[in-house]
DNA sequence: AAACTCCATGCAAAGGTTTGCATGAAAACT
DNA sequence: AGTTTTCATGCAAACCTTTGCATGGAGTTT
């Protein structure tokens, strides 16, 4: 067996034809005789010919690859989004290159460079929590690489965006806590310059204000990261306050889980002494005890839509269509880690 | 600003040199004069020249890309492995292409074809639970694409392998259950043709036999998939037996979580009425209540080592070095979902 | 001064594919 | 029969880079 892959030339020489003829036949160009076309296709099949994407990419100045940059992949949140992206891109002609920024601005910068070097045809990105400046994405756009931002917004960047209405999610959660009779509601917020963190905080603040619950600054703590361990200290701070809160609205389920953990260890009953609500609705949150009340986000759909928008944008790369801005609505899921709504669901 | 990326030619013509000279200068070829070299490097920097990987790939018949095939990505298990892989490959010259087979043999086949077409330089793979035949991997090897198998073995395939001693993990868990006084130990096993499932089952069986605990066939149930919902029915079957088990060793933490859920719903106390042990040690398993006893696996290291072995194999692609077979030892982590070891840890 | 060495640079091919244009032959028209 | 049309195929360039070999000039040797 000959070394190396089968090329157009190989097929051409075997059939005593020109490579161009073979190429046209395989692409169903009309100007090729039926017989030759059949013979070519048959031989290509037999030899398991597979066009060389690098030659194609070189010629057409595109890689048929799209890049995905996410801060991490170990949370269910981003891995579910990626699954949604995969399920849309997979069946298309494009390949996906997934990259992890590890919540670091520097690494994100390196990744953008790497993907740009690779001549990706488009990029899906959720910026790191350390990213404040979006010029690296603008540089991509200037190179005609479309950028779609998902979940975490990049304020000021003009691009297609697929987001979640975090404000609404937080508002729902906090208003529910108020209705259920909690009066001392704390918030475990996320890293500060994330759009999601800001919007959830605002939802929290507005829900308090609208319902005339006085705001206490010491009831707001911000975590450094999104994993369990990051929630321990801030929770302790809250619960060790003289006038400790009777409810915690946490930035995500991980933090909510460690809040529950800390609260239990301090001898508090959930939800009788303290209600706890998370965000994300990770699949296992149902299995905590008490089962965690949380805010569900349509992660899979979010991934799919982002991918679809990017594909469309790549196709109509020239048309100066307006940027799209899609916002998904999250939904509060009440379980057992928070008191029942005392008002009832009469209306 | 001119359309398209900067090429060697652009630099060459601006400096009235030949592209070959520019190429050599940038690659630090000794035969280039110091002055020219400096001038070229300066201009290249200014214009932000980035070599076209497709041209390079075409020339050298390699893509500088390695493919990763995993069954899914939403579990912490595989996403942590991928993080390990990324952390090794990222700083190297290679790119990673992550693909999800969704536990389907057909999709896995398609992915292998896709990656082969892309001329990836190597592949890291954990086969789907539906895969029984490994010829598609052999075809890759025949095309000189090295394959490294991780976590889930492909029996009969000659390749580098990085595995976990699932037998030992299961044996440790079950023997511990026996020592803690459980006598009716059930097993919620995984999909049947996975090596991991088989080895854990064998560990379970051997631990019973070694400790003279009679085997009851109706104490063994196999789940169809690895997510929570897949555990509900099989658990019910176990707990509705006339002589219900007093311990369950589950194939993973998800299944263990739903087993706990079902048991609680049926009014059983954990661990007093029934002990439950999982596998994987997902980070949130610590936060279940009771905290889940489970078997920890060095997932991150597993990912890193697999990647390192593949890189090495790619480098020495010619040398007919023997295939490596690395087996990591898992560790039992005892928490609150299982009774305390009645014997104590005296010796 | 002729012959030689050495150094810096250029030329051209190769890698696989697509595509506009040219070619050639057969078929169809007058 | 001569001219035009149609059809099938081939040629060659382009995409960008690397690399063996050729070139030319300057400096060194005899």
Image (cartoon, coloured by chain):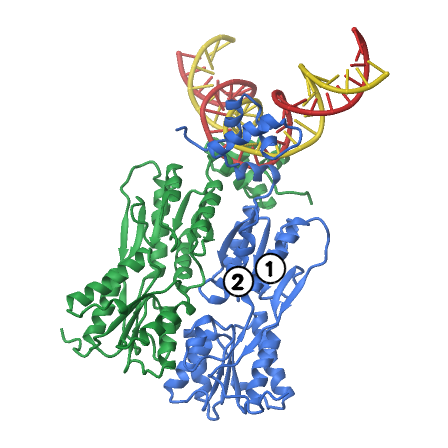
Chain colours: A blue, B green, C yellow, D red
In the rendered structure, the residue with mark 2 lies on which chain?
Answer: A
Residue B79 vs residue A287, the one in the foreground: A287
Residue on which the image places disc 2? A81
Residue A249 vs residue D9, the one in the foreground: D9
Q: Are marks 2 and 1 in contact (CB under 8 Å)?
A: yes
**Residue A272's image quarter?**
bottom left
Image location of residue A16, percent across then percent down: 54, 21
Which image quarter holds the N terminus of chain A? top left
Examine the rendering and report whether any part of residue B218 can be seen. yes
Image location of residue A320, percent across then percent down: 73, 53
**Residue A175's image quarter?**
bottom right
**Secondary structure at numbered mark 2:** helix
Q: Is residue A338 above or below residue B142?
A: below
Q: Residue at x 31, y 73 (%)?
A: B238
Residue on which the image places disc 1? A306
In the rendered structure, the residue with mark 1 lies on which chain?
Answer: A
Crowding near the residue tagged with mark 1, few <14, some 14–19, many ≥20 C-alpha atoms within 10 Å: many
Q: Is residue B130 above or below residue B146?
A: below
Q: Is residue A87 above or below residue D5?
A: below
**Residue B190's image quarter?**
bottom left
Report how far apart the C-alphas of labels 2 and 1 lie in the structure.
9 Å
Image location of residue B212, percent across then percent down: 15, 69
- Residue A129 falls left or right of residue B1: left
Residue B116 vs residue A195, the one in the foreground: B116
Which image quarter holds the C terminus of chain A? bottom right
**Secondary structure at numbered mark 1:** helix
Q: Is residue A39 above or below residue A303?
A: above
Residue C8 vs residue B148, the one in the foreground: B148
Q: Earlier in the sequence, mark 2 or mark 1?
A: 2
The numbered mark at residue A113 is: none
């Amino acid at each position: 067996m000959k070394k190396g892959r089968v090329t157009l030339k190989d097929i051409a020489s075997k059939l005593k034809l020109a490579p161009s003829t073979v190429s046209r036949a395989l692409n169903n160009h009309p100007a090729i005789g039926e017989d030759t076309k059949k013979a070519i296709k048959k031989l290509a099949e037999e030899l398991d010919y597979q066009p060389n994407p690098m030659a194609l990419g070189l010629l057409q100045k595109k890689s048929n690859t799209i890049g995905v940059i996410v801060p991490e992949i170990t949370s269910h949140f981003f891995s579910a989004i990626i699954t949604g992206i995969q399920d849309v891109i997979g069946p298309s002609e494009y390949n996906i290159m997934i990259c992890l920024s590890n919540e670091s601005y520097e690494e994100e910068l390196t990744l953008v460079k790497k993907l740009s070097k690779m001549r990706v045809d488009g990029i899906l990105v959720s910026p790191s929590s350390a990213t404040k400046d979006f010029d690296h994405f603008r540089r991509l756009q200037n190179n005609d690489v479309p950028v779609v931002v998902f979940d975490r917004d990049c304020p000021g960047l003009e691009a297609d965006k697929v987001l979640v209405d975090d404000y609404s999610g937080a508002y729902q959660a906090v208003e529910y806590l108020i209705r259920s009779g909690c009066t001392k509601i704390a918030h475990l917020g996320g890293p500060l310059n994330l759009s999601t963190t800001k919007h959830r905080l605002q939802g929290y603040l507005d829900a308090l204000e609208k319902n005339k619950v006085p705001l206490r600054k010491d009831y707001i703590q911000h975590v450094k990261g999104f994993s369990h361990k990051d929630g321990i200290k801030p929770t302790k701070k809250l619960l060790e306050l003289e006038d400790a809160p009777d409810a915690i609205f946490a930035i995500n389920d991980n933090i909510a889980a460690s809040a529950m953990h800390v609260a239990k260890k301090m001898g508090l009953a959930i939800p009788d002494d303290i209600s706890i609500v998370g965000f994300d609705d990770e699949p296992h949150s149902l299995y905590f005890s008490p089962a965690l009340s949380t805010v569900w986000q349509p992660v899979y759909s979010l991934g799919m839509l982002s991918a679809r928008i990017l594909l469309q944008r790549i196709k109509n790369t020239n048309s100066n269509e307006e940027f799209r801005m899609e916002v998904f609505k999250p939904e509060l899921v009440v379980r057992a880690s928070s008191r029942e709504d005392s008002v009832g669901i009469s209306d």
